[in-house]
Image (spheres, rainbow, N blue to C red):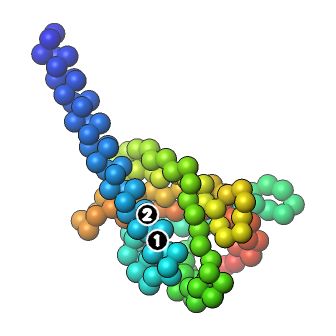
Amino acid sequence: MKKLLISLFMLVSVNTAVFADNQTEITAIFNKYVNDANNYSTNLPNYYVNNAKILRVVNKKQGGKQTILIPYDRYLKELKGHSALARAVKYKNTYVNQKITRAGSDYKLSATRIPRNDKKGLPCYFVFTKTESGWKIKEESMTTNVQTFLSAK
């Protein structure tokens, strides 16, 4: 019985250490991602797996929310195209209340995104998965008040 308890304790300790290490890595990668995004870097696609799932949860003006799935290729095109405008208006996001949880073999970083000129913030999350080249975003969801997403194709 004593050996069983020691084995269980060791297993829990190792699992906790791995979670802490992964959490530290993901936090560092996310902070680098935010810095690159806020500095309009062209390497943002390198943070994502191919065909990442990109969601926008739109707060509708008449009330309620609608989730829009953005095709990854369109997301990359818009990211590239909107970069110059974002730079011109000095658009930046701040992320507060970050929390990382385990999601199977992946990790989910949830936060409140505070866009430029917003006082309250909006929920968002990023699901990170381990790849041969490190942790990458495989799913991103951001809540937005931008109504044009509702009619985008």
The image quadrant that residue 1 belongs to is top left
| Residue 100 screen position, x and y as percent | 45, 47
- Residue placed furthest toward the top: 1
Marker disc for residue 31: 2
In front: 56, or 153? 56
Q: Count the marks.
A: 2
- Left or right, 41 with reference to 95: left
- Quickly name the residue at label 1: 35
Q: In this view, does 4 lie to the left or right of 135?
A: left
Q: Looking at the picture, does residue 5 appear above or below residue 135?
A: above
Q: Which residue is drawn at 40% across and 56% down?
A: 27
Q: Where is residue 105 in the image (x, y as percent from the top left)?
A: 34, 48
Tell whether 60 sits left or right of 46.
right
For residue 68, say whether it is visible: no
Q: Where is residue 84, by image quadrant? A: bottom right
Q: Does the CB distance between marks 2 and 1 fall below 8 Å? A: yes
In space, the residues marked 2 and 1 are separated at their CA atoms by: 6 Å
**For the view shown, which residue lies furthest in the left direction?**
3
| Label placed on residue 137 | none
Crowding around mark 1 (Cα neighbors within 10 Å: few <14, some 14 to 19, many 20+) is: some
Which residue is found at the position 44% from the left and 44% from the top? 101
- In the rendered image, the residue lying farthest to the right is 62
Compared to 16, does 151 lie above or below? below
User: Which secondary structure, mark 2?
Assistant: helix
Q: Is residue 89 visible?
A: yes
